[in-house]
Each structure stands twice: as structure tokens, then as C-alpha cells.
Image (cartoon, rainbow, N blue to C red):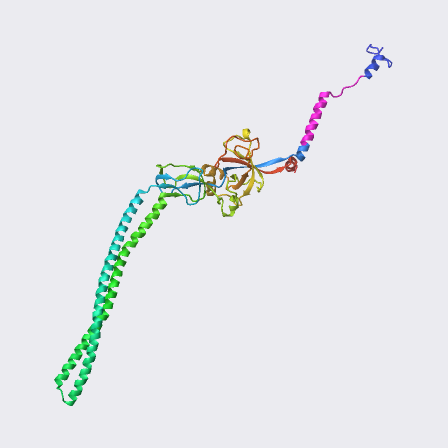
Amino acid sequence: MTENGKQADAPGNPAALEELDQVMYVVSSRAWLALGTVGLLLAAAITWGFLGNVLTKVPGQGILIRSGVLFNIVGVSSGQILDVTVTEGQVIRRGTVVARLAQPEIEAELREAQSLLTKLNEEMAFLEAEQEQKVDLVYTYIGKQRATLEESIRLGTELVKELGELVLYYEQLRSAGTVSRLDLEKWKSELRQAQIRLLQDQQELAGLDVTRHQTDTQMEQNLLDLTKTRVPVEEHVLSLQERLRTFSEVRSLHSGVIVELHRNPGDRLQEGESVATIEMSPWEDVAGAEDADLFRVKAGKPLVVAFIPPFQGVELKPGMPVHVIPETLSEDEYGVMLGEVQAVSRYPASPKGMMRVLDNQELVETLTLNGAPVMVTVTLREAPDTPSGYRWSSGRGPATTIESGTQCMIRVIARGQTPIELIIPYLKGVFG
């Protein structure tokens, strides 16, 4: 017996030996299962840390354009619209007349100037006819006078010659004393008178040329005086015609496709107001001449012009994949449109250039709050078998078309990194 009054188990006790043969359960099966799960998760995390890929996405906002930037065709003056000469979807060239405006004040002034010009033209035509008739009469008279004087000069010349010979003969007779001095002086007097008449005829003949020249000069002066009055009126008419053409015709400054009409015939258009919106083609520079390559794409190629806020700390390059989300559609329902970066502007975009693309002052102000953004052009992947014509990340996308001018959100997939690459810099910062 022991001190406790209990019988001690002898080494040969059969009950004690049976207890030694039983299995000892240190950990349960559920604990092993949990431990294995944790181990698998840890292994997966380590594997993902070295082999996984974390994407860096750069957001931006832009607009979908198929052929070129959008541009409003505006009037340079006010007036009532007489007619609109284009339709939506029509392809037009630079300089095409889109609408015509009534300009009653200019038209009235032009009619008055044209009436005055017509009157002056009639006066000039009458003066030319009258002077031509007068010149004909003067020339006819001069012609007759010339013939008469020439004949008189011919006869006078012969008379002077004959009288000269006769005077010489009488001088010889006078020397011989045959005739008196009075007879000699008589023939000398006849000779002098004949010579005087001959000189007068010659002078009058020469005066006919002067008279003809004076007649021509006077006619030219009369026409010149009338022309001096007519020319300013004619210039005024041409100026009014050009002014009427400029103010009454609303012309497109670019080639492209009419996207939307804003006015109808009969509407009152104020100066600077838009008549229509055109999608310009070929591409024109928006950010500046240095970035002209941003817009050198095939006409009709779907494109998104977007603006990325500055200081993203990521260098964007052509070829980077892009997710595009139209603001009118749900990403959860349809996914995203797929594309890639075509070009990145080398210089920040100006508000003026952004307005030409976005045509939304509020959006431009929002995008420029933190500084001038970088402009990015994104080409979209086309898919003829989808209703929209674009490739989507989920299925066929929406059952509707996406029109040019739709505003979009974009995410540029700038780069991919393994998780360990992101953790190591953090650990270095924590542990020094």
C-alpha cells in the first residue's frame, strides 16, 4: 500500500501496458488542413511577388475623332440666314459656302453705287460718241483746209517765182532807161504781196496741225476728267461687292465632313456664332507646329485625342496600350475600348489648342487646373464585326455606334512591374 492508501500499479499490470500501446494525437486534421492552406497561400504570394505583374495606369480625358479635330464654322457678321447649302455628313472642301446671310444695308449701298456708276458710264459713252463725231467734223474741215492751202501755196510759190523773174527783167530795163522807176516799184510791190500771201498760207497750213493736236488734247482731257470721277465710284462698287460676298457668305476654312448643323434658314445669326461643326481632314496642327506628326493619320482612322495631367512621373511612349471608356457607356457593362498610343506631344498643349479639339471651355479649365497637360493621340483597334466598329475588352461592346465627338476617359498602361519591385523600395525606406 502507498501512503495515499492506493495500490500501486505493478510493472506487470495488464491495464498499464494497454495504455502504452495507444496513439498520442498531438495536432488535429483540421489544424493540418489550415496549416497547409496557409502554406499554399504563402507560396502563391511569393510566386506572385516574383512573377506577377502590377500595371501602372495613367488617366486622362479626351474626345473621339474619326478624321480630324472638330471646328465650328462661324459667321463673320450678323444677319438673317437665307439658306444653308450643306447637309450633315456632307464632305466639303476649304472655302465651300455653308450658308448665306441677308445684308440689306450693304445691298442698298451697293445698288446706289452701281446706279451712280451706270450713270457715269452712260455719260462717258455719250461723251466719247459726241467727241468722236466732233473730231470727225474737225478732221474733215482740217482736211479740206489743208487741201485748199496746199493748192494756194503751190500757186503762190509759182507766182512769187514769176514775179521775181519779172522784177529782175524790169531792173535790167530800168538800168537801160527803158522803163520808169515807178513801173519797177509796182512789180516789186506785187512780188512782196505775193510773198506775204505765201507766208500766210504756209503759217495757216502749219496751224492746222496745231488745231488737230488741240482737238485731240481737249478730247482726252474731257475723258480724263470724267474718268477721275468714275474710277473712285467703280472702286467703291468693287469694295462693296467684296464686302457683301464676305459678310453674306459663311465659308468653311477647312476641308472635312459636316458633323452637325446648328442653324436653319430664317434664323438670326450673330457675329461669331456657329452655323455648323466640321470634322477637319486632313489633320491640322492643334498643339503647335512642332507636333504636326500627331495628326498625320489616314483619313477616317478612329482616333482619340486626349490630355494627360502633368507630373505623372511616367514617360509615355508610342505603342503603349490604352483603355478608352466613352462617358456615355458603363465600363462594368461593356468593358473598355482597346487602343494604343500613337504619339505624345513634345510640348504642353495650350488652352487655345485644347479648345479646338474639345470645344468645351469648362473641360479645358478643368484639365489645366494643375498646369498645361500633355496631349496624346490614341489609335483605336477596329473590329468590323462589332456594332460600334471598335474592339472591346468584353465581348462585342454596345449595340450602338459611337459618334465622333464623344468625350472619353482613357487609361494609358504605362508600365508593368513585379510586386517585389514595388516592395523592395518600400522596405528600403522603412529599414534604411
Q: Is residue 230 left or right of residue 269?
A: left
Q: Which residues are magenta?
A: 22-45
Label count reads: 0
Q: Residue at x 69, y 30 (%)?
A: 43
Q: Residue at x 83, y 14 (%)?
A: 18
- Residue at the bottom extreme of this rendering: 176
Asked if the magenta segment contains residue 86, the reply would be no
Name the quadrant containing residue 177: bottom left
Q: Residue at x 22, y 64 (%)?
A: 140
- In the displayed structure, 76 sits above or below 2; it is below
Magenta span: predominant SS is: helix
Quadrant of the image containing the C terminus: top right
Residue closer to the observer: 41 or 253:
253
Q: Is residue 118 left or right of residue 408?
A: left
Quadrant of the image containing the N terminus: top right
Residue closer to the observer: 185 or 220:
185
Residue closer to the observer: 174 or 337:
174
Q: Is residue 120 left or right of residue 341?
A: left
Residue closer to the observer: 175 or 289:
175
